[in-house]
Amino acid sequence: MNDKPAVNRDAVIDQAIEYAIEYAISWRRIAAMIERYWYLLRSSWPRLLELIYWPAVQMMMWGFLQLYIAQNAGFFARAGGTFIGAVLLWDILFRGQLGFSVSFLEEMWSRNLANLMMSPLKPIELVIALMVMSIVRLLIGMVPVSLLAIGFFGFNLYGLGLALAAFFLNLILTSWAVGIFVSGVVMRNGLGAENLAWTIMFLLMPLTCVYYPVAVLPHWLQVVAWSLPPTYVFEGMRALLIDHTFRADLMVQAFAMNVVVFGAGVVGFMLLLKAARRHGSLIQTGE
Amino acid sequence: MSVPAIAVERLVKIYQRGMAVDGISFVLPVGSVTGLLGGNGAGKTTTIAMIMGLLTPTSGTVRVLGVDMPRHRYRVLHRMNFESPYVEMPMRLTVRQNLTVFGRLYGVTGLADRIAELADELDLAELLDQPSGKLSSGQKTRVSLAKALINRPEVLLLDEPTASLDPDTADWVRASLERYRAGRGATILLASHNMTEVERLCDRVIIMKKGRIEDDGTPAELLARYGRGTLEEVFLDVARGRGHVREAAQ
């Protein structure tokens, strides 16, 4: 009789150990993957330069356009920085997703995915490492460009203060959700689906109203726009720069939607991984 | 009775294009070296991929070191490893960087010493700081082998480890595998088209054809059963459906 509780306790401990082995996240393995992507980034200066090049070109073009329009229209003179702000926030969304997806594509290009998938690295650890790398790549690109915006156009992104943190959090969550899902699609279907990684965000560009208010869209398209979390961020940015009002309500709504979108991205990735294991895609990582 | 290194039971894999593995079963004891022979499309790589957990079986079971492989793979993956010329290492990373990353993924302790040890054993010392992509195919194979041995695996799966290597390098790789097996007591499962390799390394041979096991035995048993002098002749008999020559003659 007295032995029974002891047996149960042992069983619970065994179960807990097994659970830990199956589901525990290893920061050592995540750090190893970040180290792997960092080595990769460091090994090629053109790749580093590329991280800055396009955001800088975009920012300069929209900045000068805004300068020109502001000299000829009263409204735009008051709405100082909306174009530059929009292009910088758009780059957080676009480059965040690209930073995630490109790091994943590196595994496909180098035919290394099978090595990783048969190692103790868990899919969730790979996803976390890719999220960290998307921030690293984003910072390498965006910090110099945001400084250029101050120098050329007197637009200080960091002057947005806490609002910038809210914008950043919401945009990066959307970008990760899309990046995770696209990586799953590429893993399941091979490099034939690679173009999706480069183009999917441009589908969101007109719908999330990066450069114009939602009110510009036809009514039925406005419904679609408001179903996308980045729309709330770009509307919030315009409210801040034009009306000098921080719309916390928009940020909270965007965050709530992002939690759902991010969860859907992770679940989609796991289902696609399962399908890839079923269809043999992990051992055929080519076209 | 000790737990076998690998136990495969009624394993089936069906793709949309057809049956790849058709109900195979085998048990590999700890410390054995087994060759998986067969022509293209025989199901060797599919079988190895299912043992590694890269591919989900349609039905049947795979247990590695007693662990149900598809379901509980994370309990055993750190005790096994794999090498194939068809799976590469990141090309722009140096050999040392690649081995460091994989060493950390496998939780290897004393990693710097282990890399130095492998560099010594596999003659990689001069290559350690070169990008993996700039190596010759023979050098790449040695690096892949170093990656496969980084965690001192108890179970080592090899898919045509000497494909496209010159005879000297291939011989060198086989010698390394023999040393590793002798030193570690590891279990090795080797898919190969190379009969010389199989005869030299393996104490058991499983011959596959169209997803099924056609024959299974030690090299000596197979030679006797088919009345042949080499495994290559045995392989050709099986591939061409000639069956057991001696048995047929009797």
Image (cartoon, coloured by chain):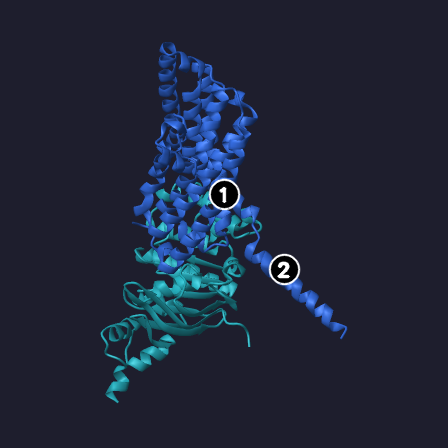
Chain colours: A blue, B cyan
> Is A242 placed above or below B227 here?
above
Nearest the eye: A25 or B214? A25
Question: x%, y% of residue B146?
Answer: 45, 53
Numbered badge on residue B10: none
Figure quadrant of residue A202? top left
Q: What residue sits right under mark 2 in the picture? A: A16
Residue at point 42%, 37% (across, down): A97
The foreground one among B184 and A141 is A141
Asked if B238 appears above or below A139 in the picture, the reply is below
Residue matched to label 1: A129
Of residues A224 and A276, which is closer to you in this image?
A224
Query: Taking B91 as reference, is A1 above or below it?
Result: below
Disc 2 to disc 1: CB gap under 8 Å: no
Q: Quadrant of residue A196?
A: top left
Q: x, y (%) of residue B22?
A: 34, 72
10 Å crowding of disc 1: few (<14), some (14-19), many (20+): many
